[in-house]
Amino acid sequence: MPDSWLDIAPDAQFGLATLPYGVYTVDGGEPRVGVAVGDHVLDLGAVARAQDAPFADAVGGPNLDALLAAGRPVWDAVRRSLTTWLTDPAHEETVRPHLVDRASVRLHLPFTVADYVDFYASEHHATNVGRIFRPDQEPLTPNWKHLPIGYHGRSGTIVASGTDIARPSGQRRPPTDATPTFGPSVRLDIEAEVGFVVGTSSPMGGRVAVDDFADHVFGVFLLNDWSSRDLQAWEYVPLGPFLGKSFATSVSPWIVPVAALEAARVEQPAQDPEPLPYLAGSRSWGLDLRLEVRLNGHVVSRPPFALMYWTAAQQLAHMTVNGASLRTGDVFASGTVSGPEVAQRGCLLELTWSGKEPLTLPDGTERTFLEDGDEVTITATAPGPDGTRVDFGEVTGRILPAT
Ligand code: MN
């Protein structure tokens, strides 16, 4: 990878290997599409106009919607141009005026979220949750290894990183009681996940094959599926998650393009039994993303995304196999990422084994589930080309008392 004329520290968070897209404002001004590079954000709309780029209209709006809809050839052209503009000294004079200090920007939800689906693709997570929620049964349900299980979430409550999360209230029934009570959730949890955003739509009645993943999915980001376990445990039978999840879902503001993840692609874990033919295709859509979960600044888990049983490409094929259409801005998430080790579990339900094994934080306090004032931050990195690093930034959120 060539060097930039821009002074990017070797250990900078966003080197040329990542070049993620986001939406920013400066001092309450108009939202603009930006690209993070080193300590800067490049005003992509302005620089594309200055360069008279053919895709200037697709990146000139207040969000990523037009770029998402533009499709793979345009996504590739933008990324190629960005690399050229930031490495060829001939472009420095035109590009430099459109760099802003990254510390001075406010980041926003970068695209209009269409539909939202959340999956359940970690075998370790599903096994642990099965043991906790249904101790007298097989931990994995009979369908689990035949299809990527998912549910439709609430797209209208997907919020940008940094948004405070009010503790939800609702119905719960303690195991010792015959009837439910109403009140603030007492088992508020996180789920460390990876999200995917669809760019290119597909028609109703069509199907998207596993191998067409990169033609439809624009980018990848981090997602915290805040979950109220007491609400969830009472309401989820028989139709699945509802109010225990729909109050808020936080997403990281920088969208890492799929094209940045070529060096992070790995073979997915062996699948036994062999999935049905519509779920077959490239097995190398495993992604070597290494997540870290911090609770009040203290690392409590390092979930390995490479071990996910179902890939995002299989999830996309499954979502459309019945003829459901895809819309630009559709989000689907992986499900909680958990590995085989205790310190690789992506939610407090598993980390504390349903509250029976509290975590001790460095300040001496213990946690089973989240307390008011707690702040949770998820970060991730992945290998980039030639020993470089792809960085996903962070998704963070703080718990406020119930209203
Ligand atoms: Mn989830």
Image (cartoon, helix red, strand yellow):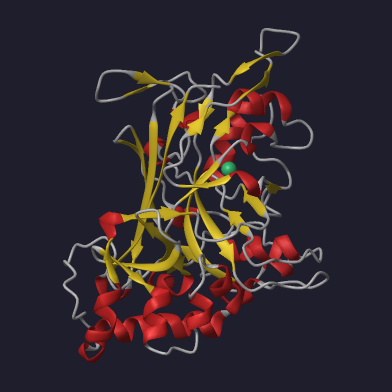
The quadrant where residue 184 appears: top right
Locate residue 367 relative to residue 182 in the image: left or right: left
Q: Position of residue 19 (x, y in %)?
A: 36, 70
Q: Position of residue 370 (x, y in %)?
A: 45, 25
Q: Residue at x 36, y 71 (%)?
A: 43
Q: Residue at x 28, y 85 (%)?
A: 94
Q: Residue furthest top?
A: 177
Q: How many marks?
A: 0
Q: Position of residue 385 (x, y in %)?
A: 32, 75
Q: Position of residue 1 (x, y in %)?
A: 26, 81
Q: Residue at x 44, y 47 (%)?
A: 161
Front residue of 68/280: it is 68
Front residue of 141/256: it is 256
Q: Is residue 166 above or below residue 148?
A: above
The quadrant where residue 34 appears: bottom left
Locate residue 386 relative to residue 168 in the image: left or right: left
Q: Residue at x 41, y 43 (%)?
A: 162
